[in-house]
Image: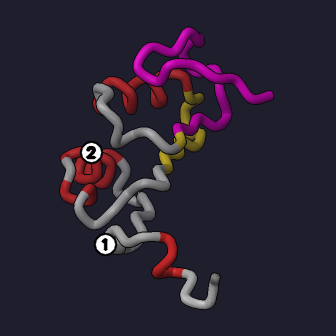
Amino acid sequence: MLMTGFVEQLSFKDNSFDVAFHTAAINEPVDQGKAIKELLRVAKPGSRVMITDTRITAESAQQPIRRELVRAFPSINVPPLHPSMPLRTMLPNSP
């Protein structure tokens, strides 16, 4: 079952979910620390918490949230980040 909520104030009980994830907006103007704490609160002990953001750029990699995620989750997989570039430059053969 998929459930949604506002990441800074989730209306779910503690330890409610086998997986908790947040997509596409962790770099938006939210209280990032509160958001992560809420995800951890609603996730069952030992479960997975995933945070993805398709808008991460080399510039945003310098934000404190990235350092905090690595500190909080030592085994986190933080892929290499690439500089921002227009999509068209990634598709050179397109019309």
Q: Examine the image and state in which quarter residue 29 appears.
A: top left
The reply, left or right, for residue 33 in relation to residue 2 is: left
| Residue 83 disc label | 1
Residue 5, x across and y down, in percent: 57, 19
**SS type, badge 2:** helix
Q: Residue at x 34, y 42 (%)?
A: 27
Q: Which is nearer the eye, 79 or 47?
A: 79
Q: Which is nearer the eye, 43 or 57?
A: 57
Determine crowd level at label 1: few under 14, some 14-19, many 20+ residues with C-alpha closer than 10 A: few
Q: Which residue is mark 2?
A: 65
Q: Examine the image and state in which quarter residue 15 appears.
A: top right
**SS type, badge 1:** loop
Say what amino acid the circle numbered 1 marks.
Answer: Pro
Which portion, as a residue range, is magenta?
1-22
Work out whether mark 1 precedes mark 2 in sequence or the reverse, and give the earlier one. Answer: 2
Give the farthest residue toward the front: 95
Vertical position of residue 23 compared to residue 35: above or below: below
Q: Residue at x 44, y 14 (%)?
A: 9
Say what amino acid the circle numbered 2 marks.
Answer: Ile
Give the farthest residue toward the right: 1
Q: Residue at x 59, y 12 (%)?
A: 12
